[in-house]
Image: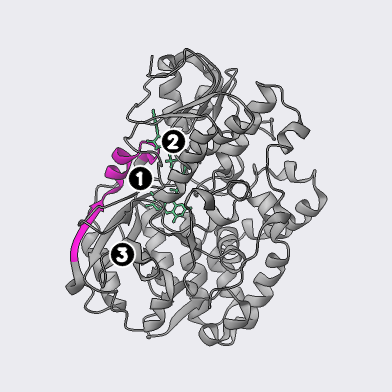
Amino acid sequence: MARSKRADYDAVVVGAGPNGLAAAITLARAGYSVIVYEASDTVGGGCRSKELTLPGFTHDVCSAIHPYGVASPFFQTLPLEQYGVEWVHSPAPLAHPLPDGRVATLERSLDKLGRSLGRDAAAWRRLIAPRIAQWDDIVAGALGPIHPLRQLRRPSAALALARFGAYALQSARGMAERAFDDDPARALVAGIAAHAMLPLEQAPTAAAAVLMITMAHVVGWPLARGGSQRVVDALAAYLRDLGGEIVTGTPINSLGELPPARAILADVTPRQLLALAGGRLPERYAQRLKRYRYGPGVFKIDFALDGPVPWSNPDCLRAATVHVGGRLPEIAASERAVWNGAAPERPFVLLAQQSLFDGTRAPAGKHTVWAYCHVPHASDMDMTGRIEAQIERFAPGFRDRILAKHAMTARQMEAYNPNYVGGDINGGLADLFQLFTRPIITPNIGNPYATPTPGLYLCSSSTPPGGGVHGLCGYFAAQAALRTVFGMNATDLDALGSAPASQIVVEEPVQ
Ligand SMILES: Cc1cc2nc3c(=O)[nH]c(=O)nc-3n(C[C@H](O)[C@H](O)[C@H](O)COP(=O)(O)OP(=O)(O)OC[C@H]3O[C@@H](n4cnc5c(N)ncnc54)[C@H](O)[C@@H]3O)c2cc1C
């Protein structure tokens, strides 16, 4: 049996990613004893930071930018600030350099978009202002345990989601080319939609773009001062203060290794759950889990620099996130190539320059750059040269500033964290079908987290609402366990401190 202080627990969680920790906190807040087992030596899953390159340079190993963290109705109920989390906003959430020297800048304020989007600023406002007005309902729907029928229970959310859902049936490319005339707005949409890791001609990439754009305006795209690790360290410290236990350095190979418990919540993807459960899952359910599909992988690279990135257009220095990939057609071609199994010659690069806004990340005058691009599933292609070449196009002299670098192929990502199957960072493909059927199609629409094995739940990003550091998969899975296994009723669950979406704080843009 895996190491533990007690002989048995009310609940055991496998995996200390943001969702595993969120599940454990929810159970501990309800007064139940809980222990978390983590394979790695540190907590955090996809939310760790480390000195990957040189002493004094702190790099976010996986997640870096946290719109989902600040938007999460669950995180908003936690005393994260008291436990050391400080969100840092750059003056603009996102910059996107174009080959003609212009930079498309996504500003927090709709009123400031004119400078970079020109005549498309009015169309941007027409598209996004209604979504900002419906933000509470969109959060309740899109960041809830997504199922279209479930939303019918709340009429206002159903209406907002029906409007938002119209984008779920559209492609980002179609939407951008219809709505906008010029490259800056189209490129912004393309780069943001590419986070979905699907071809931009495919639904629901328009919805992915609209959701993330609305987040940029409403809550911003901040980073965590000191590194993303601070977020999970805060979750872990809060859990311990609630009486929860965490055991690191303990990979669980079979559910049989766990101490006896009434509920087991697994922060793993379906493929790992099958291995962990062995024969415990009914055959029909196991077959359906086997059909769960994974998406493309990522190639990740971190740089230590002896100065900031020498962007040709200094407007790029106003944003913590920079999307490097040029115009919409070029980004679309890159994502299509990946989808078709080829590593793109000119990859679309997602880049963050945290040290410009957080002096703790690097020694004075030095800087960190975090970057990744999409690659075919399970690729072991080294994309270092291609990523550097893309950055050089928009920042000549970038290579000369590199002091050290650290890269991981898609296969190495999976070795680093078994939840990244084939390098897929979203816990499974988020196409239109699997967006609504994570992890399987189930008639139990309020509870996709439960398995047919009593007391066994999935709580990772392979469940709704999917990828991102928000803890909501863990929170909803724990709520399901509290209802079913521990017999808590809706009133007791509400009293646990889940904030209604209307309590979301809308921050003023950073000047
Ligand atoms: C390069 C990259 C960039 C990203 N950028 C962002 C970003 O900027 N913003 C954002 O919001 N999200 C981002 N993400 C996605 C985000 O990190 C994930 O969606 C999130 O971490 C999922 O949380 P989780 O708890 O479901 O799983 P994970 O974070 O993957 O955690 C799972 C944990 O379970 C452990 N585990 C698995 N199997 C076992 C076992 N058998 N026994 C014990 N422990 C086990 C793992 O070691 C891991 O610690 C990024 C991811 C990557 C890789």
Q: Amino acid at mark 1?
A: Gly
Q: Where 95 falls versus 156 (above or below)?
A: below
Q: Nearer the viewer, residue 136 or 299?
A: 136
Q: Where 319 falls versus 378 (above or below)?
A: below
**Number of marks in the rendered image:** 3
Q: Of the residues under marks 3 and 1, which one precedes in the sequence?
A: 3
Using the rendered image of the protein, determine whether residue 301 is visible from the camera's viewpoint: yes
**Badge 1 element:** helix
Residue depicted at 21% across the width and 63% down the height: 385
Q: Which residues are magenta?
A: 403-421
| Residue 250 forms part of the magenta stretch | no
**Badge 3 element:** strand
Using the rendered image of the protein, determine whether residue 438 is visible from the camera's viewpoint: no
Q: Amino acid at mark 2?
A: Ala
**Residue where numbered disc 1 is placed:** 423
- Res 369 label: 3
Q: Nearer the viewer, residue 392 or 303?
A: 303
**Badge 2 element:** loop
- Res 16 label: 2
Q: Quadrant of the N terminus?
A: top left
For residue 198, side relative to residue 164 (left or right): left
Q: CA distance from mark 1 to mark 2?
A: 19 Å
Q: Position of residue 460 (x, y in %)?
A: 50, 37
Q: CA distance from mark 2 to mark 3?
A: 26 Å
